[in-house]
Amino acid sequence: MIELKEIEIIVQKRIGSVQKRDLQSIILLSGKVNQGDPFMISLYSEALLQAILKVIRCRISMRDRRLLLLIILSPMMSARSLKDLSETCMIGKNSLYTVLDSRLPSSWLSGIQREGISRLSSHVQRLKHADSSVRSRECITLCADDSTRTVCGDFGGLAHPCYSGAEKRAVKGLRTRALIAVIGEGRKHIILDVHVVPPKSSGPGRPRHSEGEWLVASLKRIESQLNDYGLSIKGCYLSVDSSYAAGCVLRYADDAGLKLVSEVKGSLKTYWQNILWLPANLYFFVIETLYQKKFRLLTGEFDTPYYRHKTRIQVYGEVLVVLMHIGGETKRFFTNDDNMKSLTIRRIARRRWQLEQVFWNLKQLLGLPGIHNQRKNRVLVRIYLCFIFAQAIKDCSGDLDITMRKLHKILERNPQVLIEQINCWCASVLYDPANESSIQELAA
């Protein structure tokens, strides 16, 4: 077994100067080192703190920085609320509320968006000069979806009746939309935008954005910011839930050069043999019955029969539709790219589940259920901090070559190490002089 001293030589430098290649070297050198070893737990803690601060990138006082890190990492300390956290860490509860109120929710959201654009532009720039194999292997798939958390209480006026896909019924909850960029098959992702859906307005004024309107507005913002760098989202894939696949989204995808993949809603009207309009559910039932013998097995997934054809849908016009038998049910995917392979359509549709995994992690591991505040701004800030945590722990687990759940489990079993690391870090300078200019620019 390799001695721990060899690993210590690599990490003797301040954590702020550790590069990705250094972390990879640590993993190679520690191949047989037990992940439960105290040294490795300390290493994981430092790497996670570094990842969180890279995402936050704002200048705050040492005291507020410590409290902020404790709030973000409270799910790993078995703290179900800020009251539990204050008792665990022996700090005043009011001081936690003060740090939450120190910045507006819009400031945190802008930080998430800026960091997302910075990461996305770097990857687009890299693909621009890469060969075709790299562009195919590390392609960008933009994914949009939403999630509902059932709640009790008003939550600052943000809780309202909405449909829960998990419970298959309308519930009173907090509904959150997100847009992410999945790199390749999902080893990495970039959180680009987050939106907490407000209740429907009952008085005068503009109604809230629908799913499609919000998605188009977010994509336009991303395209505009990439254009400032001389880049574009043209050629990227767009994989969305059927509720986001409105006509305006398809028109924007055509104009922007995005390759859209989504499922066809059963209620949409579909043209049958240039004779009459049928509901999509009935149309595809007829197609599946009449053309059962024309279904072929999907290359690479020999348990997935499929049938592809062009059809005219009232909202979209003429599109390519692919019927696939997956897990005992028939999925009906459509795309605006007539030349897209059926296997590619299947893979793009599957990548959207990376966003579903993000929502699952937020609910189960990363602290979303621990939000019990009744002030609107505090609720919004806590939600944005949860998404920051989700991005940071994904980055950290990728750099350390460990699954996110395993990393969370190891640190959850050793919360005292995290608390000690936070106290140690906040007693020293956390940022390198080399990063100071970029931090000031992002904080401006």
Image: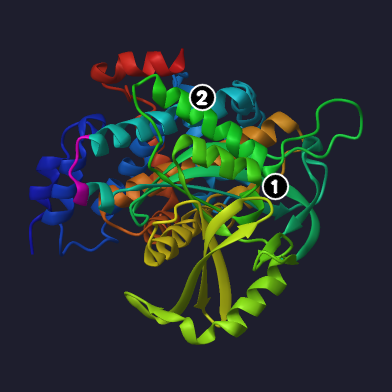
Given the image, on which type of amino acid does mark 1 rest? Arg
Please give the residue where the numbered disc 2 appears in the rendered image.
64
Please give the residue where the numbered disc 1 appears in the rendered image.
175
Whether 303 is drawn above or below 90: the answer is below
The front one of 372 and 211 is 211
Whether 157 is drawn above or below 413: the answer is above
Whether 72 is drawn above or below 340: the answer is above
Measuring from the top left, give residue 160's x and y in whole percent.
81, 46
Measuring from the top left, give residue 171's x and y in whole percent.
80, 57
Given the image, on which type of amino acid does mark 2 rest? Asp
**Is residue 218 found left or right of 140 in the rendered image?**
right
Which stretch did the figure color magenta?
A: 129-133
**Is residue 70 found left or right of 289 in the rendered image?**
left
The front one of 265 and 196 is 265
The main secondary structure of the magenta stretch is loop
Q: Residues within 10 Å of mark 1 (few under 14, many from 20)?
A: many
Q: Identify the secondary structure beneath mark 2.
A: helix
